[in-house]
Structure formats: structure tokens, C-alpha cells
Amino acid sequence: MPDPLMYQANEAYVILEPNQPEQFLTPTELLEKLKVILGDRQDDLPQDLQRFTDLTDQARHLMETTCELDMEPGQFLQWYAVRLEK
């Protein structure tokens, strides 16, 4: 499990999806993306997210405690914190 300290004051996340080029998102953009995905999956949430009733809390917990979400068999979404050079 990733250390939550890694995610403090991050500039961006790189997002990896099957058959898609990598994307760079801000923490706010990643949170919104996860909310959309989780909003469509409320009947099929990972067990650790079922304790949260609020969609934002679900997405924030997922974003801060893991770096992958299984979408369907053989499909996944991964995100990694990155610091962009200026």
C-alpha cells in the first residue's frame, strides 16, 4: 500500500488506461475522474469503499490509499503521483 505522505502537495498524477495514451491530471482532475467512475459502479464497489456513503469520500480514499482500480476482467485504471519539472 502506498504511503499517504507520497500524495501530499503533489503537482500531478500520470493516469494509465488500457488502449489509451498516458495522461497527466491535477489532483482535482483525478478526484473528479474517480468520482465519475465510482458513480457508475455504486452496485459494484471494492469492499474497502463500501463503508463510505459519499462519492467524494470514496474517490478521495481510493486516490490516497491505492494506485489501481480494476475496471472489468483484464482492464484497470492506474495512477501514480509525479512531480513535473519546471
Image (cartoon, rainbow, N blue to C red):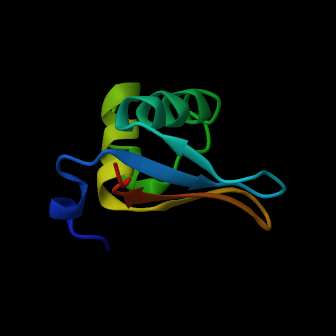
Residue 69 x/y as whole percent: 56, 57
71 left or right, relative to 55: right
Where does residue 28 sit, x and y in percent of width and height?
37, 29
- Residue 57, quarter of the rendered image: top left
- Single out the residue that lies furthest toward the bottom: 1
Q: Is residue 84 left or right of residue 46?
A: left
Q: Quadrant of the N terminus?
A: bottom left
Residue 51 position (above or below residue 4): above
Q: Is residue 50 above or below residue 36?
A: below
The residue positioned 61% from the left and 44% from the top of the image is 44
Q: Residue at x 46, y 30 (%)?
A: 29
- Of residue 53 and residue 70, the one placed in the foreground of this image is 70
- Residue at 22% across / 63% down in the picture? 6
Percent x, y for residue 41?
A: 62, 36
> Measured from the top left, where is residue 22 in percent x and y?
66, 54
Please identify the residue farthest to the front as the structure is shown.
Answer: 86
Viewer-nearest residue: 11 or 77:
11
Q: How many numbered circles are shown?
A: 0
**Residue 82 quadrant:** bottom left
Front residue of 66 and 12: 12
* In-image side of 75 versus 32 (left or right): right
Query: In this view, which residue lies farthest toward the right?
Result: 19
